[in-house]
Image (cartoon, helix red, strand yellow):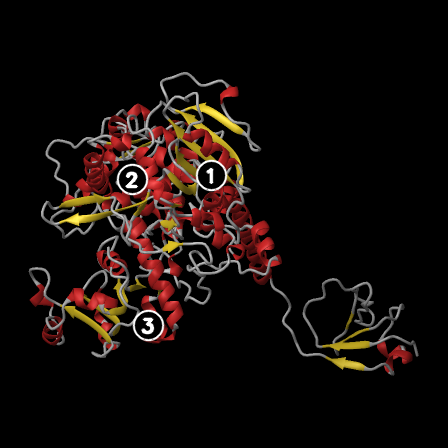
């Protein structure tokens, strides 16, 4: 017996390929290692025997175990062809995928930096320092909401002028992908077709003039007017990089009377609109939050479309309506032929619909349902934001406004139309703290970006501007936290740590030193003047980093020996244009982020300066100082009034002796309209009131008044009374006029009244003076 040899018996097969035939014995022997076999009419025996002999003559092989295997049909030519076809198909598919990947990889690499810059900010250095100090990363009042419901789907409405994607749940990204594949010879994107050089150094926006016979809606008139009145408007198309149509495309409902036909044809007929155009662009598309305790949980009141777009969701709302805390009302009464399509529920729905007032529902509900409608946008969505009613979005495929920069998960509940029955449990699952955060954020977004047509237009332009120059743009922290991106200009800095609003969010502390900025208009007399005494007192402060004197006098700059010697650097520079508004110009010589603004006739001691700076470090986004003023409404004259009376109420802290952040110098020079600056310069007055208006409009908070000595106002009025602008007979009347002019500019009164005054510890207490840190303040 041969060891390690096995014999396998196969059934007879007509195939004798790859076999050697012995004609005398009808035996074919195949060695297992060589793939040859032995076949006879009784069967086939395969062995590792080397000699070609009948099985009967190999006794050693007869004792070897024999395995009988089932019959398998031999492979045919047809089956082998199918295998080859399958392999070829798989190979072609792989090559196609590689080809598509190669087409997209260039765009992905080009957009990677831009998208990475606009993601939620990452500040490892800030957070690591905060963790080492044991402080939370986000200790401010606007806490991160980490347990909110995530979005199910993202997307937008069907577009008229592009290839149709016949699926109501497809997203804009998917539709753009389909459109790109259909028009491969016109792969035009912002990164490839936009002429970015036209946007430097000025980001100009040109509005096409109305064509003869065109009629546009009142809303679109406001949009175009907001652009034309903004700082971005360019009347010369050759100096613009963004072009806005005068064709009203707000209403895309084909059944609407305001629907504009043949939009594409009308656009292409414009004289300056062609394939070489820099950018093929279409048109640019309160009160404090009420109490947290509301009567209703979820409400909706609107049309019930019986057929067409939006009918599926709205026709099913009655399933979750309970008439108690969930009130979802619909009516069939819309359109001229609604009775032809009415169903059995219409009459009952119409009766229920008339029982409730829409505004009452909005302001007394925690959540407001925003189902799919028949337009690209939703007025109901904006109405919910205005009422601080948390929107519950049920419109798969709708891309929320400004979703590129706004994190809507912190302000709305993003649901799924296919999971309508889960909406009640979703809203009940949220805790009271989460509801409060959602409501605060929704009201903030409304006030910052949607409360007026002008803000919507400016937000649109700012987003486009950030796209054009992403190296000088805002990140998502600036867009999604107070005071909003419209007040955080990236031209000042793209680092949030340079602004006064984000110290708490970043775990940072305000700057430890300040720069004293003194506005000087009078020539230096021979004897010691108030401005020289002021320089000496401020320089003695342990927090003072430098002193800058803005020389706005018509006299030449005094020589250096006329100025006192100080322990900190003293810079005397000419004021910007020698105007009143120039005192807030952002001079490069100002080094510290904290500024102590002073008039030349102010009288402050070192202790007063130190204490005020300590207070400012707790309120770095506000104005903190000494002289306070107030405003009031004069009902008899229907105008705002201005008063300097000493009362327990104030709304302004004058910048003649006050601390504020350096960023407000840049914002004052860049944001305030030129006509208001001209008004200030013409009257040589009101620049301090204008700064208060600006800071209060940004922060929505009152300034902070610190301990003030009684003789401060008297001293300021008496010193140099012949030349002081405070003694001018028209001074007070001009300030009355300024208050009303500034309120008209903003469209509302931003000043906030306060009755808080911060004094040093043990101030005026009947204890030993040795126990008081700022003991000199009480003697002044």
Residue depicted at 44% across the width and 63% down the height = 145
Q: Earlier in the sequence, mark 1 or mark 2?
A: 1
Crowdedness near tag 3: few (<14), some (14–19) or many (≥20) residues, C-alpha within 10 Å: many
553 vs 606, left or right, is left
Q: Nearer the viewer, residue 213 or 386?
A: 386
- The one nearer the camera, 237 or 670, is 670
In terms of depth relative to the viewer, which is nearer, 80 or 44?
80
Image height of 311 relative to 611, above or below: below
In primary-sequence order, the first of circles 3 and 2 is 3
Which residue is label 2 attached to? 689
Residue under label 3, please give it: 423
Within 10 Å of disc 2 (Cα), the crowding (few <14, some 14-19, many 20+) is some
Where disc 2 sits, the SS reads helix
Which element is circle 1 on?
Answer: loop
Q: Which mark is residue 366?
A: none
Query: Which residue, given by chain and number where applicable, does mark 1 sit on?
Result: 493
Residue at x 38%, y 64% (from the top left corner): 437
Mark 1 or mark 3, which is nearer to you?
A: 1
Kindly report which numbered mark, 3 or 2, lies closer to the viewer in this rendering. 2
Q: Is residue 69 left or right of residue 348?
A: right
Determine the image quadrant of residue 445.
bottom left
Alpha carbons under labels 1 and 3: distance apart? 43 Å
Q: Residue at x 31, y 49 (%)?
A: 449
Mark 1 or 2: the one toward you: 2
Which image quarter holds the N terminus? bottom right
For numbered disc 3, what is the local secondary structure? helix
Whole-percent x, y for residue 317 in the image: 24, 72
Q: Position of residue 485 (x, y in %)?
A: 38, 46
Image coordinates of residue 78 in percent, x first then y, are 56, 61
Residue 693 location, x and y as percent? 29, 43
The reply to whether residue 231 is visible in this rendering is yes
Task: Give the Cα distance between marks 1 and 2.
Answer: 26 Å
């Amino acid at each position: 017996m041969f060891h390690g040899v096995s014999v396998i018996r196969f059934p007879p097969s007509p195939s004798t390929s790859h076999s050697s035939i012995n004609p005398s014995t009808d035996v074919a022997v195949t060695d297992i290692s060589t793939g040859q076999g032995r076949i006879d009419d009784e069967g086939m025996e395969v062995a590792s025997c080397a000699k070609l002999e009948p099985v009967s003559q190999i006794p050693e092989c007869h004792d070897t175990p024999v395995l009988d295997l089932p019959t398998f049909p031999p492979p045919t030519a047809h089956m082998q062809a199918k295998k080859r076809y399958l392999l070829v198909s798989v190979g072609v598919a792989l090559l196609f995928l590689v080809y598509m990947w190669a087409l997209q990889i260039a765009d992905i690499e080009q957009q990677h930096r831009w998208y990475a810059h606009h993601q939620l900010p990452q500040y490892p250095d800030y957070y690591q320092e905060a963790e080492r100090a044991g402080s939370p990363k986000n200790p401010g009042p606007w806490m991160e909401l980490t347990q909110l419901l995530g979005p199910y789907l993202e997307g937008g409405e069907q577009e008229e002028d592009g290839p149709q994607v016949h699926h109501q749940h497809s997203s804009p990204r998917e539709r753009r992908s389909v459109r790109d594949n259909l028009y491969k010879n016109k792969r035009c994107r912002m990164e490839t077709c936009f002429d970015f050089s036209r946007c430097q150094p000025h980001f100009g926006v040109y509005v096409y003039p109305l064509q003869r016979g065109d009629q546009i809606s009142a809303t679109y008139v406001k949009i175009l007017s907001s652009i034309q009145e903004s700082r971005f408007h360019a009347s010369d198309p050759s100096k613009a990089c963004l072009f806005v149509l005068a064709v009203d495309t707000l209403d895309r409902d084909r059944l609407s009377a305001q629907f504009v036909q043949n939009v594409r044809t009308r656009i292409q007929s414009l004289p300056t609109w062609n394939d070489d155009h820099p950018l093929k662009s279409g048109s640019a598309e309160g009160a404090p939050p009420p109490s947290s305790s509301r009567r209703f949980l979820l409400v909706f009141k609107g049309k019930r479309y019986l057929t067409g777009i939006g009918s599926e969701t709205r026709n099913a709302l009655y399933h979750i309506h309970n008439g108690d805390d969930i009130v979802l009302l619909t009516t069939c009464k819309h359109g001229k032929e609604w009775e032809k399509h009415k169903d059995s529920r219409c009459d009952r729905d119409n009766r229920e619909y008339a029982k409730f007032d829409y505004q009452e529902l909005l302001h007394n509900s925690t959540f407001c349902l925003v189902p799919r409608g028949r337009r690209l946008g939703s007025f109901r969505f904006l109405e919910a934001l205005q009422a601080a009613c948390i929107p519950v979005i049920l419109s798969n495929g709708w891309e929320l406004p400004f979703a590129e920069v706004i994190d809507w998960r912190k302000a709305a509940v993003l649901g799924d139309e296919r999971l309508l029955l889960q909406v009640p449990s979703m809203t009940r699952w949220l805790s009271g703290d989460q509801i409060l955060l959602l409501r605060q954020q929704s009201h903030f977004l409304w006030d910052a970006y949607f409360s007026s047509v002008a803000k919507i237009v400016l937000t649109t332009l700012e987003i486009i501007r950030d796209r054009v120059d992403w190296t000088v743009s805002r990140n998502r922290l600036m867009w999604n936290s107070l005071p909003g991106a419209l007040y955080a200009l990236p031209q000042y800095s793209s680092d949030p740590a340079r602004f006064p609003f984000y110290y708490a969010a970043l775990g940072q502390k305000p700057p430890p030193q300040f720069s004293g900025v003194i506005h000087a208009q009078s020539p230096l007399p021979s004897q010691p003047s108030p401005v020289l005494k002021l320089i000496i007192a401020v320089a003695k402060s342990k927090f003072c980093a430098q002193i800058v004197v803005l020389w706005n006098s018509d006299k030449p700059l005094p020589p250096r020996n006329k100025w006192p010697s100080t322990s900190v650097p003293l810079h005397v520079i000419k004021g910007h244009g020698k105007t009143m508004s120039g005192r807030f110009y952002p001079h490069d010589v100002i080094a510290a982020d904290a500024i102590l603004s002073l008039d030349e006739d102010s009288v402050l001691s070192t202790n007063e300066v130190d204490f005020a700076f300590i207070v400012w470090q707790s309120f770095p986004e506000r104005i903190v100082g000494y002289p306070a003023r107030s405003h009031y409404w004069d009902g008899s004259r229907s105008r705002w009034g201005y008063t300097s009376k000493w009362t327990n109420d104030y709304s302004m802290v004058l910048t003649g002796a006050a601390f504020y952040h350096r960023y407000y110098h840049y914002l004052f020079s860049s944001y305030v309209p030129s006509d208001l600056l001209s008004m200030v310069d013409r009257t040589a007055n009101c620049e301090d009131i204008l700064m208060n208006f600006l800071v209060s409009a940004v922060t929505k908070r009152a300034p902070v008044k610190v301990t003030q000595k009684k003789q401060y106002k008297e001293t300021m009025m008496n010193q140099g009374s012949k030349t002081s602008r405070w003694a001018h007979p028209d001074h007070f009347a001009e300030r009355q006029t300024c208050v009303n002019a500034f309120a008209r500019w903003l469209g509302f009164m931003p000043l906030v009244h306060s009755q808080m005054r911060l004094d040093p510890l043990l101030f005026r207490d009947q204890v030993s003076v040795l126990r008081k840190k700022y003991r000199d303040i009480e003697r002044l």
